[in-house]
Amino acid sequence: MNEKKGAPDAKLTKHRRFHLNYPWLSAAVPLVVLVVGLSIAHPRFLTQSNVTSILLQAAVYVIMALGMSFVLMTGGIDLSQGSLLALVGVVAADLLQRTNSIPLAIIASILVGAAVGAANGLVVSCLKIPPFIMTLSTMYLCRGLTLVITQATPITVQNTSFKWIGGGSVLGIPVPVIIFLIAAAVGQFILSYTATGRYILAVGSNREAARLSGVKTRWNECKVYIISGVMVAIAGIVYVARLGAAQATAGETYEMEAVAASVLGGTSVLGGEGGIIGTVMGAIVVAIIRNAIVLLNVSTYYQQMITGAVILVAVIIDVQRKARVAKQVD
Amino acid sequence: MSDDILRFENVSKTFPGVKALKDVSFSIRRGDVHVLLGENGAGKSTLIKILTGVYQADEGGAIYLNNTPVKIHDTLQSRSLGIGTVFQENSLIPHLNVAENVFLTRELRSKSGAVDWNRTYQECERWIRELGVDHINPRTQVRRLSVADQQIVEIVKVFSQNPSIVILDEPTSALSDNEIDNLFRIIETLKAKGVTFIYVSHRMEEIKRIGDRATIFRDGAVTGEIEDCKTADMDQVINMIVGRTLEEKFPHRESHIGDVLLDVRDLQVPNTIYDISFQVRKGEVLGFSGLVGSGRTSTAKAIVGAIQRTAGEIWIGGEKVKITSPSEAIEHGIGYLPEDRKTEGLILSKSVKENISLPSLLKKFRRGIVLDGRKERAAAEEYREKLRIKTPSINRLVNFLSGGNQQKVVFAKWLCSEANIYIFDEPTRGIDVGAKSEIYQIINDLVSQGAAVIVISSELPEILGICDRIIVMRDGRITADLDRADATQELIMSYSI
């Protein structure tokens, strides 16, 4: 009933396109509501220093969530993100302490991230182990390894140039924000302008059809875990540089914040759908909630409840909206 | 009072922007096999969805069941009115066994409230027997059954609820000829027990065999009635369906057969296909006939590397090539159109454009590492026009196209990949007459440009109508290699069974 020509159809298409082509709408709504609501509720919310601190806080989430979004787009999940963040941080801090070489620390961190990602990807794609199980294992493995290396003692970073990555700014823009913007731009580029982006979405939507169309499904599935690992490594560097220390407990449950940001941003946990802008907005929403709790002097015990409620409401609204749009064309 | 079990009076259904049914009026006689005919999108499915309670009809019309007006609000109500439906896509749960599926949500319980398995299996067995079937065990997991047997289970499930009307929506689209015979026997058995059937199909030959009366739909309206299918003039029927004369069902083609392009030697997949060797030449259409499960699809998939073969060589244009995955097959110019367009052929949640370009992204639509969006759009537009894909835009999700147009998108995808060897697995399954003949034309154009085409089809007239040569398979082996001049339906069948 849907191949009728003419004006009514064009109208429908336009309507649907607006809803379906902008998955980030689901994050935009809570973002706007929060920003408007909080700027009314608290005069200091929209000050430059507060916005900066929100964005600083968001940086680590955004970078990790970008990686998570790619994994989710294939229908997978990467639970090892939080632990990997700690491991990478320890590797970077340890190398800085020993060699004081920033390039070495950065390169080694990224390699560690990529290696863990590749391990996740290879096992998931070639051995057909469910992503949830595989990354659950690496989650424990990474956390355990971090504890063994550090013996649970934090490693401090003295190198001030390295700390600039977390605390410096260029033209008034904090370096972590610049890094997350670059990461988002690269993510958007991969997703929209390369064959890899298409393949990732194709694998997530219909693996068999993608495979029969010549998509190297295993390799592309592997790629997303590597992307995730590298993103986590970058996030880990920013994290350590900002705190000036690496500790074994860093990044606990951050993988869940990354899933939350992605889902808020319209990425489907079933795969095949997702966007970069949405993920960035989703991560900022998560950061705003954290900030608002402090700002409004609410007990931090409420923070998780509020985050949960915002995600739930946003996703319910989004799912219903999509269902409504889909119904109209059925 | 007539003996009409069901009567429609001015039934309409409007969707935003589309009138799917326009004042449809007709009646169905008790005990008939009443056929609904029409192209995809003609309104048959909408009507059935109204009967099954998926959609509600617009105000103004009326449906009479046994001369009493009824309003059907949901599927449960439809079932309680005695309307049973065997859906086109089967609704069984693969990991449950036959009896569990048949009695799903109607579990037979003992006094203690636990499921009474003994009685469940006995009852299930009884219903299966009632259909005159004896080879299905109620304890078999459904996923281990053939498609045809799954469909029989589906019929058992519907029939065990004592329906007075059974809707069969394209029941034969996945069946081979003797499975169809089997199905028709079951229909006759149930008909003798007083069940009325509503039968939706695209296949003309079947309608003659099984149908009593027929109603023809076009663009949401009834355009004709046939009083007796057995004596109906099929050309006239086709006219009523498409609203235009089809010059020929199978467009004519001059064969210009050249050198051997694809040479398959001793292909082997354990427990599936054995010693498959054959050649296809430039400009040749080679048909693969055989029953469902005879190994035709496995042969195709083994050639393109979609399933692992344990032995066998593939030579293209006189050179031995290594193909272990579909992506390598594409590099060597082989395009494989799978049998199930929805699960294998297309990514339904992506646009027409993205589907068309998918196999060729690396080969044709790349500048450095960046996708060439303009070139991709241009190519999609080109094929949309060439194959007359009816879609308001190349950005429309494939999900929203009709079956025939979806299939054209799959064709476009492979044409765009510029393959020179094509394997079409059931290329016209479940699509309407008009789209079929357009697809035959596409195949003709391909071979006239020097491609080699393999067509796997369960429809014998189709195989005989478009192929130059016909290979028949049975139980994973090639049993015959026939020239078209020598082939007849009877001969092919004799090699198939």
Image (spheres, rainbow, N blue to C red):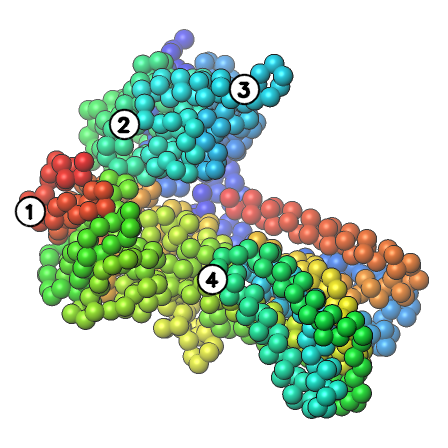
Query: Looking at the figure, which quarter contains the N terminus of chain A?
Result: top left
| In front: label 4 or label 1 | 4
**Is the same chain shared between marks 4 and 2?**
no
Query: Which residue position is annotated with label 4?
Result: A126
**Is the same chain shared between marks 3 and 1?**
yes
Query: Which residue position is annotated with label 3?
Result: B116
Query: Which mark, by number, is residue B485?
Result: 1
Q: Mark 4 and mark 2: span between their CA atoms?
A: 42 Å
Query: Which mark, by number, is residue B182?
Result: 2
Q: Mark 2 and mark 3: span between their CA atoms?
A: 31 Å
**Is the same chain shared between marks 2 and 1?**
yes
How crowded pointer 3 is (Cα within 10 Å; few <14, some 14-19, many 20+) is rated as some
Q: Callout 2: helix, strand or loop?
A: helix
Residue at left offset 8%, top offset 49%: B483
Residue at left offset 72%, top offset 64%: A254
Q: Residue furthest top?
A: B1
Q: Mark 3 and mark 1: span between their CA atoms?
A: 59 Å
Q: Callout 3: helix, strand or loop?
A: loop
Q: Give the chain letter at badge 3.
A: B
| In front: label 2 or label 1 | 2
Residue at left offset 18%, top offset 36%: B497
- Tags 2 and 3 touching, CB below 8 Å: no
Q: Earlier in the sequence, mark 2 or mark 3?
A: 3
**Measured along the vertical axis of the image, is residue B40 above or below residue A206?**
above
